[in-house]
Image: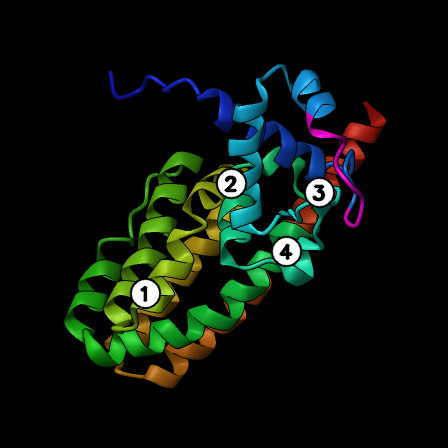
Amino acid sequence: MSDWNTPLKPAELAESRLVEAILDGHFPVGSNLPAERELAEKLGVTRPTLREALQRLSRDGWIEIQQGKPTRIRNYWQEGNLLILSAMVRYARSLPENFTPNLLQIRKLLAPEYTRLAIQNKFTNVLRLLESMQQVPDTAEDFTRVDLNFHIRMTILSGNPVFTLIFNGFTGLYEVMGMQYFSRVETRNHSRSFYRKLLMSVTAHDDFMAEEVTRRVMAESIDLWQTLAAGDHNSNIQE
C-alpha cells in the first residue's frame, strides 16, 4: 500500500497547476494573475479553494497579494527564498535548463567543506561508509541510492545540521537527476573512481587531499551533466 499516491486536494492541485504555469512562462514574472472569478473557472475550482491555493503561493514567495490590487507574479529568483527552491524540486519537467547545473554548482561549493568536516569529526564513520561503497552494483538505481546516501550521511557527520537541511530539500530532484546521470556507464565509472580516491585520502588521514578530490570531482560532474544534457538535446532534435 505504501506505493499508492494520495490524490491531491483541490487546493493542492490548483497550487500545482499555477506553479507549473509560472515556471513555464504562461504567467511571466511581473505579470498579474487573472481576476479571481476567471482564474477559478479556468482551474475548475471554487473561489474559496483558489484563495487557499493563492495563500500557499504567497507564503512560499511565488506571488504578491495586495488588497484591492491584482495579484502579481514575483521575481522568485530574486525575491524568493529556500521555500521556493524546495518547491521547485517537485516540478522537474518545468524547470529551466540551467537549474540543474546551478544546483550542482552549489553542491560543488558545499561538498568539499562538509566532507572535510565529516572526516575531522567522525573519521571512523566516514571510513566505514566509504568502505561500504567500493562495490556498488552497476545500475543507475543503485548508484543514485548510494550517492544520495553518501552526501546526506556526510552532511550529518560534518556536525553542521544546516548542510543536511539544505541537502534534504533537494532529495526528490536528486533522485530524478541521479537516474538520468547514472544511466551512462562513464558517469558510473567516474563516481566509482571518486569513491575509491576519497577512501585512499581518508585512509591516509589526508583531509586536504580529500577536500581537493571532492572539489575536483564535483566540478567534473557538472561538465559531465552538461555534456550528457547537450547530447540528449541533440538527439531529440534529430528525432
Q: Do the residues labelled 3 and 1 touch (CB within 8 Å)?
A: no
- 139 relative to 129 in the view: left or right: right
Distance from Cα at disc 1 to Cα at disc 2: 30 Å
Q: Residue furthest left?
A: 124
Counting from the top left corner in percent of width and height, residue 65 is at 64, 47
Type of the residue with mark 4: Pro
Distance from Cα at disc 2 to Cα at disc 3: 13 Å
| Residue 221 visible at all | no
Q: Is the magenta stretch mostly helix, strand or loop?
A: loop
Mark nearer the N terminus (2 vs 3): 2
Answer above or below: position of 115 versus 87. below
Q: Do the residues labelled 1 and 2 touch (CB within 8 Å)?
A: no
Q: Do the residues labelled 4 and 3 touch (CB within 8 Å)?
A: no
The part of the chain drawn in magenta is 29-36
Type of the residue with mark 1: Thr
Distance from Cα at disc 4 to Cα at disc 1: 21 Å
- Quarter of the image with the C terminus in it: top right
Q: Dot 3 corresponds to which residue?
A: 71
Distance from Cα at disc 4 to Cα at disc 2: 28 Å
Closer-to-camera residue (197/174) = 174
Closer-to-camera residue (156/68) = 68
Look at 58% across and 66% down and name the residue there: 219
Q: Dot 1 corresponds to which residue?
A: 155
